[in-house]
Image (spheres, helix red, strand yellow):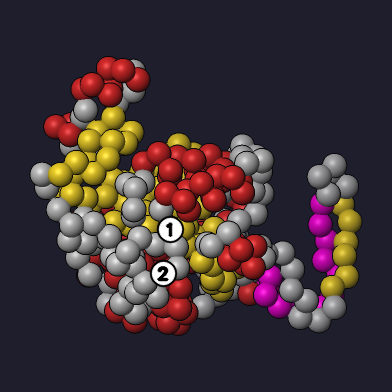
Amino acid sequence: MDALKSPGVTVDIEALLGLRYLSRRLAEPQMSANSLPGGLVNKRRGRGLEAAEIRHFVEGDDVRLIDRNVTARTGELHVRTVHDERDQTVLLMADFRPSMLWGTRRAFRSVAAAEALSLIGWRVVENGGRVALLAFGGFEPVVVPPRGRERGMVAVIGGLAAAHSAALAAGGEPVPENALTRALEMAGRICPSGSTVYIASCLEDQGAGYELAIRALNQRCPVNVLRMTDAFELAAPGGFYPFQSEGGTRRSARLSRNTTVGGEDLDTLNSWKINGLTVNASLPPEVMAGEIGALYV
């Protein structure tokens, strides 16, 4: 059996489609401290009569919405979006960098991230909203433009599976040091103003410009972070653990019993008015759904 096709190592499209019913365990969206009036329920970006904003064109956008004036002035394709004030738009960001492609229980952090984002995405479309995707890592970013209803989530899930396969195929090849920062900057360009962002990431290897990029994105669209962790990080069994330093030197470290290792301080995110939640990748989706509900509200 191909190890890369083992459960918990690859993103299973059928499994993500099945999370639609578990998503109902997430609470109804409520007012958040840094969102627009009305909480997470924002204006629907659709084919109304009032222009909402102009943003960069992404693959899948309707070519009829291309703004000729801005495109001619900048030399880059731009679209003019419109709205009719009925529902919310959510951008799901999946971090599939090499640091996410591992796990000691049940599933890789990357697979659990796809599950967590799918739970949120299904809840959004069940509430009448629209979902978009930005998946990034050691491959060309995968972008799925905002869509509603079941077809919107089917497109997002297909994007998650394709991006994760690309990440596995790339193996452990190094990615740019500022890959996370660049993804946040890209999200700021393609995310409709007033929508909401959910990013599932370990937040490791942040690189230069990370704080500026995530705070700037949060000013444009409220950001919620699912910090993906592994059972080993939350409570590492005591013992000697080998590791390799940046210079290639092999060493070992002794950890006391149930030592917590690694992880981003969520208090820092909170100080930036960014909601954050630690998600244990070893938890089954049905348990994960209940915990994510604490962030979704």
Image-based side of 111 in relation to 261, left or right: left
Image-based side of 7 in relation to 23, left or right: right
Q: Secondary structure at mark 2?
A: loop
Residue 175, image quadrant? top right
On residue 208, the disc is none
Give the Cα distance between marks 1 and 2: 9 Å
* Residue at image point 66% right, 49% down: 205
Q: Amino acid at mark 1?
A: Pro
Does any portion of residue 17 appear in the rendered image?
no
The span picked out in magenta is 232-244
Residue 117, image quadrant? bottom left
Q: Few, some or many C-alpha atoms within 10 Å of disc 1 (few <14, some 14-19, many ≥20)?
A: many
Point out residue 132 in the picture as x, y percentages from the top left corner. Answer: 32, 52
Disc 1 and disc 2 in contact, CB within 8 angstroms: yes
* Residue at image point 25% right, 33% down: 79
Point out residue 51 in the picture as x, y percentages from the top left corner. Answer: 19, 41
Q: Few, some or many C-alpha atoms within 10 Å of disc 2 (few <14, some 14-19, many ≥20)?
A: some
Of the image marks 1 and 2, the number of the one nearer the N terminus = 2
Q: Secondary structure at mark 1?
A: loop
Residue 218 is one of the magenta-drawn residues: no
* Residue at image point 89% right, 56% down: 251
Q: Which residue is mark 2?
A: 32
Q: Quadrant of the C terminus?
A: bottom left
Does any portion of residue 72 appear in the rendered image?
yes
* Residue at image point 65% right, 54% down: 204
Q: Is residue 105 above or below residue 269?
A: below
Front in this rendered view, residue 97 or 145: 145
Q: Is residue 57 above or below residue 232?
A: above
Q: Which residue is mark 1?
A: 222
Q: Is residue 14 above or below residue 146?
A: below
Q: Amino acid at mark 2?
A: Ser
Residue 243 is one of the magenta-drawn residues: yes
